[in-house]
Amino acid sequence: MTTIVSHTLSVHQEHELLLKLGAAGLTDDLAQRVIDSKGNFLAAKVVRLIENGGFEATTSQKRAREIMGQNFFGVEEAIKHFGVNPSKQQLAALAEIPFTEATLEACKEIHVLVALLPISILDIRSKADSKLFYEQSWYNKESFARERGEVNWQLVRKTPVLNSTQKTWDEQQALLNENEETPTARVVIYTIVGHYLATGERLFENIYVRCSNVDSRGGRVHVGYFDRVGLHVGSHWDGRRYSDLGVTSSRKFN
């Protein structure tokens, strides 16, 4: 029986683990199935389930992952990389993907499908490696950096909207089609940092993109230049035009 537990566990941990599993219904027959499973398949599945806090993906989520490939940051990734512990209500809210398969197929190359859980920009900064954020303090007390927002799925564009640099905010908004909107800074930062931690790919590495928030002075928040110095967060007036300041978008729900 002890062969199913790691040799790195203490004797006390092994004893407590076996007591817990026995109380949950583990029998000698079930234990033997784990031992006999090819390639440690069942044992690995149990470990993944523990890592995910007991979360199991729904059919809808599994299908979305198949379509999106690496451009998928689901509940499992949020638990692993952001240390969140979703409630039953939050998991229920994320059970079904609110986009059709046709929409996912159309967006799978240029968007990331993100399971958005209620953590703020400051939460993300504190949980992630500090080197992922450029050292800034100006937004520590800003409401946009402290808000935790809603639980939902977001399809966030990986690149700026085409031809959106050298334009004012209003001109950039005119580029969006009826199925698009500009997401908040929290959604964009959650996507940038989460996607990097899951895949190693840096989004918006050489450009800023405007978000829907304004800061306490009325400046439009922008994020980007996610290089090795870290992710930058700033703000500018809506009427300004810059060659390195575009706008991002996300898909509206079907």
Image (tube, rainbow, N blue to C red):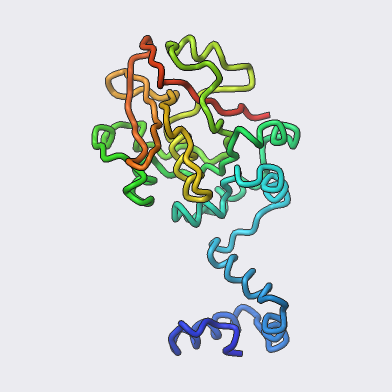
**Picture quadrant where residue 207 is located:** top left
**Picture quadrant where residue 97 is located:** top right
Would residue 160 appear left or right of 100 to someone viewing this image? left
The residue lying at 58 percent from left, 48 percent from top is 74
* Position in image of residue 112 (x %, y %): 58, 38
Classify 169 as above or below 100. above
The residue lying at 65 percent from left, 55 percent from top is 57
Classify 83 as above or below 110. below
**Picture quadrant where residue 229 is located:** top left
* Position in image of residue 172 (x %, y %): 49, 14
Classify 169 as above or below 206. above
Q: Give the tally of numbered discs.
A: 0
Would residue 250 appear left or right of 102 to someone viewing this image? left
The quadrant of the picture occupied by the C terminus is top right
- Point out the residue furthest to the right here: 102
The residue lying at 70 percent from left, 31 percent from top is 106
- Foreground: 97 or 210? 210
The residue lying at 46 percent from left, 82 percent from top is 8
* Position in image of residue 221 (x %, y %): 37, 25
* Position in image of residue 67 (x %, y %): 71, 43
